[in-house]
Amino acid sequence: MASVDTLEKKEEANELGYRTFRILRKGDTLAKDEVLCPNYTHGTQCRTCGLCGGLRSKAKNIAIPIH
């Protein structure tokens, strides 16, 4: 996983083979290959989620609104 804060950095990391966790700033929208972090949508805790499992997970890239 790579933590990024712009769409451009997400694309760079994806090209290098990384899945990403991106911070969405005001006005940002999800890319087609991103899902909202379950902590934001459902209150799920990281330790029970597993989506940020790097290459162990086949999930989409993850994004969360800045908070």
Image (cartoon, helix red, strand yellow):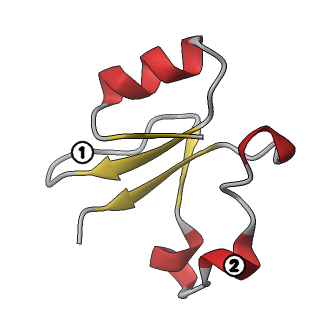
**Label ID, residue 42:** none
The quarter of the picture where the N terminus appears is top right
17 and 65: which is toward the camera: 17
26 and 4: which is toward the camera: 4
Picture layout, residue 8 above or below residue 34: above
Question: In the rendered structure, which disc, 1 or 2, sits on the residue that comes first in sequence?
Answer: 1
Residue carrying label 1: 28
Q: CA distance from mark 1 to mark 2?
A: 27 Å
**Label ID, residue 47:** 2
On the image, the x and y values in percent for residue 26 come to 14, 55
Picture layout, residue 59 above or below residue 42: above
Q: Amino acid at mark 1?
A: Asp
Camera-near label (1 vs 2) is 2
Where, by quadrant of the figure, is residue 7 drawn? top left
Secondary structure at numbered mark 2: helix
Farthest left residue in view: 26
Local crowd size for mark 2, using a 10 Å CA cut-off: few (<14), some (14–19), many (≥20): few
Where, by quadrant of the figure, is residue 45 drawn? bottom right
Image point (82%, 48%), residue name: 57
Q: Indicate left or right for 3 with 15 as reference.
A: left
**Contact (CB < 8 A) between labels 1 and 2?**
no
The quarter of the picture where the C terminus appears is bottom left
Image point (35%, 24%), residue name: 9
Image point (45%, 19%), residue name: 11
Picture layout, residue 40 above or below residue 57: below
Q: Indicate left or right for 48 with 17 as reference.
A: right
Q: Amino acid at mark 2?
A: Arg
Where, by quadrant of the figure, is residue 29 drawn? top left
